[in-house]
Image (tube, rainbow, N blue to C red):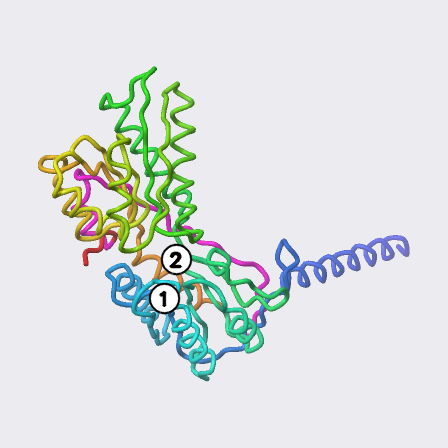
């Protein structure tokens, strides 16, 4: 009996030790050993600070964010700078500082432009105000996080690499099935990358790498023109530079489509080029709906579900209990939806396709 008691005692001690270790592990460190944030905020407001405010994409994000706020019982404020240019980053910082200074702020949902947010992130950590990243991350845009002072508890976005690969998969299928790819014959593709941010890089590389992989696997000779890394106001120059050497062109965001469309529509020689894109919007809608009848064919594009991005980001912020220590960063990939003239109107009815 004494031996049995000794064994039971040893088992109980082992169980208590394991429980203690598990509790410690869940209360302050993720798999990388990163200290978590002790969430102190008890306010009733979730501040959403976007990279823009007026564009249809951000308005759809706002609608989703407000819907989640209503569902989970939080007031949602939504703000952003007038444009998405890096020069507007100071405006974002001012808005973030105001949110962190307010006693009503429970959490911040943030999509950053550029860098230089280090002080604000430290402030958020010290005040126990969690930050949920959305659309593009703090690391993506170069805003370094101070070790041990990381207030981020999650990220909600579309994986740009995966979404661009989805474009490549569907575009490859189209050109293969429609006889555009011929073994032993070169098929040259151009890329217009909308800027030098990680978002632009991931979309361009995601498309190129997947297309290269698919072509090589089936023995097709896909080659690449010099990539056009451009900026707002110069996209039409980029497409002109690619026109005479390419059979296809990938455009990495809606802004490119908006600028390129008038150039393509006004020059019949572009009819010999196939296009594919990223994002959606009114000009992209019109171009895809044309289906190659009057103008160069925009085969398809990938849409981000911007409404769900806003909804899921605020939902994540709302479900972090005050007082909890969060050491792990939760990642929610919203994914992308490939669309063509065949399914574009269906997406309009699902809040996925935004027009503006």
Region rendered in magenta:
323-351
Secondary structure of residue under mark 2: loop
Which quarter of the image is occupied by the N terminus?
A: bottom right
277 drawn magenta: no
Which image quarter: residue 29?
bottom right
Residue 135, which numbered label? 2
Q: Position of residue 31 (x, y in %)?
A: 63, 53
Of pointers 2 and 1, the one earlier in the residue sequence: 1
| Residue farthest along the top direction in this orientation | 184
| Residue farthest along the right direction in this orientation | 2
**343 versus 46 height, above or below:** above
Q: Residues within 10 Å of mark 1 (few under 14, many from 20)?
A: many
Q: Residues within 10 Å of mark 2 (few under 14, many from 20)?
A: many
Instruction: Indicate left or right for 36 with 347 as reference.
Output: right
Which image quarter: residue 224?
top left
Q: Position of residue 265 (x, y in %)?
A: 13, 43
Instruction: Indicate left or right for 328 with 173 as reference.
Output: right
Q: Position of residue 82 (x, y in %)?
A: 29, 69
Q: Please count the marks in the image.
A: 2
Residue 309, which numbered label? none
Which of the pair 143/348 is nearer the observer? 143
Which quarter of the image is occupied by the C terminus?
A: bottom left
342 drawn magenta: yes
Q: Tell me, yes or no, whether the two marked residues, 2 and 1, touch with CB atoms within 8 Å.
A: yes
Q: Which residue is mark 1?
A: 50
């Amino acid at each position: 009996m004494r031996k049995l008691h000794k064994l039971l005692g040893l088992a109980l001690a082992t169980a208590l030790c394991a429980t203690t270790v598990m509790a410690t592990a869940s209360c302050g460190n993720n798999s990388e050993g990163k200290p978590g944030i002790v969430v102190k905020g008890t306010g009733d407001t979730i501040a959403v600070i976007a990279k823009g405010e007026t564009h249809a994409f951000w308005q759809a994000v706002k609608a989703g964010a407000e819907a989640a706020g209503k569902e989970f019982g939080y007031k949602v404020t939504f703000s952003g700078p007038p444009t998405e240019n890096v020069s507007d980053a100071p405006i974002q910082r001012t808005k973030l500082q105001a949110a962190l200074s307010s006693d009503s702020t429970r959490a911040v949902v943030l999509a950053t432009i550029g860098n230089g947010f280090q002080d604000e992130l430290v402030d958020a950590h010290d005040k126990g105000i969690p930050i949920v990243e959305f659309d593009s991350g703090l690391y993506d845009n170069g805003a370094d996080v101070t070790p041990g002072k990381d207030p981020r508890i999650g990220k909600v976005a579309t994986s740009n690499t995966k979404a661009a690969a989805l474009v490549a998969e569907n575009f490859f299928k189209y050109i293969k099935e429609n006889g555009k790819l011929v073994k032993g014959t070169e098929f040259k593709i151009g890329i217009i990358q909308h800027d030098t941010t990680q978002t632009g890089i991931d979309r361009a590389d995601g498309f190129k790498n997947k297309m290269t992989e698919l072509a090589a696997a089936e023995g097709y000779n896909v080659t690449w023109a010099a990539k056009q890394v451009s900026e707002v106001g110069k996209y039409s120059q980029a497409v002109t530079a690619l026109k005479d050497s390419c059979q296809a062109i990938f455009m990495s965001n809606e802004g490119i489509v908006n600028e390129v469309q008038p150039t393509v529509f006004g020059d019949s020689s572009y009819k010999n080029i196939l296009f594919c894109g990223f994002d959606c919007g009114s000009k992209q809608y019109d171009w895809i709906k044309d289906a190659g009848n009057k103008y160069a064919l925009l085969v398809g594009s990938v849409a981000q579900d911007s409404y769900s991005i806003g909804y899921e980001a605020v939902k994540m912020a709302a479900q972090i209990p005050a007082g909890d220590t969060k050491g792990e960063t939760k990642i929610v990939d919203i994914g992308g939806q490939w669309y063509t003239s065949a399914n574009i109107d269906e997406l309009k009815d699902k809040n996925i396709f935004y027009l503006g």
